[in-house]
Amino acid sequence: MACPPPSQLTSFELLGFGDCGWGATLLWGLGNSLLIAAGAYALGFLIGIGGAFGKLYGGPILRDVAAIYTTLVRAVPELVLILILYYAVPGLLNEVMVALGQERIILPQFITGVVVLAFVQGAYQTEVLRGAILAVPHGQIEAARAMGMSPLLVARRIILPLMTSNAVPGLGNLWLNATKDTALLAVIGFSELTKATYQASATTKAFFTFYPAAMLMYLLVSMVSIYLFSRLEKWARRGQRDVRG
Amino acid sequence: MPDQGITAARQPNTASQPIAIRVSGLRKSFGSHEVLKGVSLTAREGDVVAIIGGSGSGKSTMLRCVNFLETPSGGDIEIGGEMVAMRPDGSPADRRQIERLRQSLGMVFQNFNLWTHKTVLENLIEVPVHVLKIPKPEAEAQARKLLARVGLAEKEGAFPAFMSGGQQQRAAIARALAMNPKAMLFDEPTSALDPELVGEVLQVIKGLADEGRTMILVTHEMKFAREVATHVIYLHNGVIEEEGPPDALFGAPKSDRLKQFLKTVG
Ligand SMILES: Nc1ncnc2c1ncn2[C@@H]1O[C@H](COP(=O)(O)OP(=O)(O)OP(=O)(O)O)[C@@H](O)[C@H]1O
Ligand SMILES: [Mg+2]
C-alpha cells in the first residue's frame, strides 16, 4: 500500500473504505463484537434458564452447583474470569483429551470467546430469570397444575411467557453488558471493535478520530438495542394494566 | 327425606348414583400442625357437597387434597371409581394418574387465577388444545358456547386484567367447564368479590347445580349453601363436627359449635 503518512489524511479518509482507510477494519471489528455478544448472550440464556429452574426446582446437588456458579461469577471481576477461562479452559480440555488418548485440539478463538462470555452471562441471566420466575403469581401456576398440565407443559406454556415481562428489563441490561464485555476480549487478542480501534489509532496516531468513532458505534448499538427491548417489553406486557393507571 | 318438616331446597335424589368423589380418613399435617384429622366425604354424581366452617378450620386444605394440590398425609381418595395410588406417607405414587384425574376435576379458585398473558378465549382453550388434544377450531367453538352461557360472549378477546372480578370469576368457571370435567371444585368462589358482583357468580354456580353437576363447594355464603347443596359438612379444627342435608344442618343444628358458628356468620 502506498499510503501517504496518516497525518496528511483527513478523518473522513481515515474512517473511509479506501485503500488507506480503516473503515472496513472497524466494521469488521464491530461485526465480530456483535456476533460474539449474540452468541454469548444466546448461550448464556440457555445456561440461565437451566440455572434458574435448577435453583428453584432442582435437587440439592443441582441447587448447590448453581449457587456456587452464580456466586463465583458475580464475585470475581469479569476481566479476571476471562483471563482465567481463556487460558485455563483450553488447557484443561487438552489435558482431558490427552488423558483420553486423543489429539490436542486448538479451539477457534471465536468459540473460546463466546464460551467465556457466555459463562459470565449465564450467571447473571440465572439470577434475572430466577427472580422473574419467582415473580410469577403462584395462583396461575397452581391453576395450570390443577387442570392436569404436566410440569413441563406448565413451564413452557405458563411460567415462561409469564416470566418474560418480569425478565425483559433485566435481560435488556444484560444484553448491553454483553456487547460491552466483548471489549474485554481485546486483552486476549481477539479482534473485535475495541482491538480494531486500538490498532487503527496506534498505527495512525489518530486517537481522536478512531476512539470517538468507536464510541459512536457502541452508542448506536445501545440505542437500537434499548429500542428493540422496549418494544419487546411492551409486547410481553400486553395482558397487563398500565401501572401508571 | 328431611324429617324436620322443612321443605328441602333441593332433593338429594342421587343415592343410587355412582360415586364421583370419595375421601376417607383424610389426614393432613403442615409440619407438626395437624390441619385435617381424618375427614371423609362422599359425593355421588349430581351431588352438591358444601363445606362450611370457620377460618382456618381446614376447608381449603380438604378441597385441595382432592386434586392433590396439597399432598395428603394419610387416608384414601377415590375419583370416578378409581383409587388414587398413594405411597405410605400419603404422597401420590403416580404423577400421570394425578394429571389424568385432575383433568376430570374443574377447580375454581377464590382469586380466579386466570392466566394474565392470555385472552379469555385463550384461557378457555389452553387445556382442551394442549392437554386434551382437541382440535383448535372445535375447542374454540366449545369455548364460545361456554362464554355465552356465563354471559361473556363479548369478552372473548379481552385480557383478564381488564375485566371486573365477577367477570373474571365467570370466565374462570367457563375455563374449568371447558375441560368437560366430571366434577367441579369451588374454593370460596365469591370471597374476593365486591358484594355487588357476588350475585352474578352465584347465579352461574346455581345454574350448574340445577343441571345436575357434581360439585364440592367451600363457601361462606350460608344462604347459598342451603339453597344449592344436597349435603353440608361443617368442619371445625380439622374434624367434621356435623354433617347432613342442608335443611337439617341449618334449620336444626345439633352441636353447640355449629349453633355458635351459624350465629356468628348470620
Ligand atoms: N401451605 C401451608 N403451610 C402451612 N400451614 C398451612 C398451609 N396451608 C394452610 N395451612 C394452615 O392450615 C390450617 C387450615 O387452613 P385452610 O386454608 O384449609 O383453612 P380454611 O378453612 O380454608 O380457612 P379460610 O376460611 O380462612 O379460607 C390453617 O391453620 C392454616 O394456617
Ligand atoms: Mg380457605
Image (tube, rainbow, N blue to C red):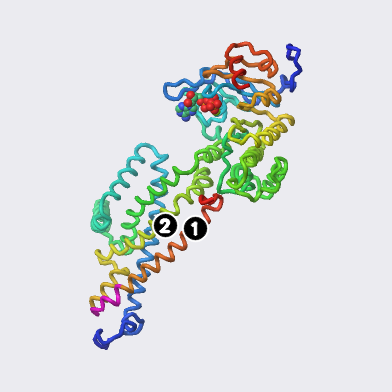
Q: Which mark is residue B241?
A: none
Q: Which residues are magenta?
A: A204-211
Looking at the rendered structure, the secondary structure element under dot 2 is helix
Q: Main secondary structure of the magenta part?
A: helix
Q: Residue at x 32, y 63 (%)?
A: A182
- Chain assignment, label 1: A
Mark 1 is on which residue type?
Leu
Q: Which of the pair B113/B127 is nearer the observer?
A: B113
Q: Which mark is residue A232?
A: 1
Direction from residue B19 to residue B39 in the image, left or right? left
Residue to which mark 2 is pinned: A172
* Residue B257 higher or lower than A97, as above or below: above
Q: Which of the pair B165/B63 is nearer the observer?
A: B165
Q: Earlier in the sequence, mark 2 or mark 1?
A: 2
Direction from residue A157 to residue A102 in the image, left or right? left
Q: Quadrant of the N terminus of chain A?
A: bottom left
Discs 2 and 1 carry the same chain letter: yes
* Residue B160 higher or lower than B77, as above or below: below
- Chain assignment, label 2: A
Q: Measuring from the top left, give residue B249's x and y in whole percent.
A: 66, 16
The quarter of the picture where residue A134 lies is top left
Q: Is residue A210 magenta?
A: yes
Q: Measuring from the top left, give residue A7's x and y in whole percent.
A: 24, 85
